[in-house]
Amino acid sequence: MRDLKVPAERHPEKAKNPSTVRVKKPDWIRVKAPGGKGYAETHKIMRDNGLVTVCEEAGCPNVGECWSQGHATMMIMGEVCTRACTFCNIATGKPPEDLDVFEPGRVASAVKKLGLNHVVITSVDRDDVEDGGAEHFAQTIRAVRHNCPETSIEVLTPDFLGKGDAGDIVFDAAPDVFNHNLETVPRLYPTVRPGARYYQSLRLLDDAKRKTPRIFTKSGLMVGLGETNEEILQVMRDLRAHGVTMLTIGQYLQPSKHHLPVERYVHPDDFDMFKREADKMGFEHAACGPLVRSSYHADKQAAGEEVK
């Protein structure tokens, strides 16, 4: 496998200190700067409806492409996350106490204006809320369903800290796709996702499929954080064992010098290998590529089309 690796002294546990050495991005990871009429129109709809998108907050490299096509991933429950995952560019801190009761309606309005046939709704972690924001997700699903009955709905949720029946609240609202990202391999959870638990996340995905069989379940992984390809393959096996049939795998990109460094840029040949192995394992759909993200061309993935 052809991986470009960072010098050995650069370890993930040093991520909170500014990085002094950066790995040069290979040609296959470069994207065009956002712009154009479609991008501007999507941006205006988001601002006019007072909405936050993970496309902007997380610094997604595909924002220019997606927004130019009128696609955006709605991020509900504010801009401040209660966790401090070391790979994520979303602000961490103490959010406002109350959730915005009018937000579900604004999301539904934006979905209608954009004319989306598929929408992805995600959120910050809100561990300060009794149900982790599960009811807010459910209200948003119902609002979109009422306003745009032909639009398929995908939710990308946090783990809700395993709070009671929080997952059931979202399942009962009947999204078409339930997505929860494992993000990385279990060995790296203490460094990458210190507030999460690997098997708790697997259990949430298993519950979604077991309790609501008609829902498609999905999860996403990043590579380049110090994991091995074999560890990624084992996580893929774990996902299949818990009923997950939709998968995304993409390259981790360091948002700033204060975040985890990139340990390797994984070659496109390795992503092709992940795709082949996913097909062998029985995933109904797997999108694997350097610039693939959990919501990237989610409409095509939900429709069973190939995504590269």
Image (cartoon, grey):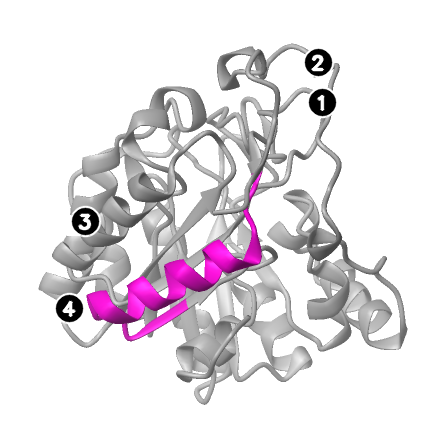
Mark 2, other Cα within 10 Å: few <14 / some 14–19 / many ≥20? few
What kind of residue is marked 1?
Lys
Residue type at numbered disc 4 = Thr
User: Dot 2: what SS?
Assistant: loop
Cα separation, mark 3 vs mark 2, equals 34 Å
Q: Nearer the viewer, mark 1 or mark 4?
A: 1
Is residue 69 left or right of 78 when viewed as pictured? right
- In the current view of this chain or complex, which residue is farthest to the bottom? 150
Q: Where does label 2 land, which residue?
A: 18
Question: Which of the marked residues, 4 or 3, is nearer the chain's N terminus?
Answer: 4
Amino acid type at image mark 3: Asp
277 in the magenta segment: yes
**Label 3: how many residues lie within 10 Å, few (<14), some (14-19) or many (20+)?**
some
Residue at 56 percent of width and 52 percent of height: 75
Residue 251 in magenta stretch: no
> Do the residues bearing badges 2 and 1 touch, measured as CB atoms within 8 Å?
yes
The residue tagged 4 is: 212
Closer to the camera in the image, 215 or 138:
215
Quadrant of residue 264 in the image?
A: top right
Does label 3 or label 2 sit earlier along the sequence?
2
User: Magenta span covers which residues?
Assistant: 265-286
293 is higher (above) or lower (below) than 172: above
Q: Name the residue at 73% across, 68% down.
A: 65
Principal SS element in the magenta part?
Answer: helix
Q: Which mark is on residue 257? A: 1
In the rendered image of this protein, does residue 142 appear above or below residue 218? Answer: below
Looking at the image, which is closer to me, 226 or 239?
A: 226
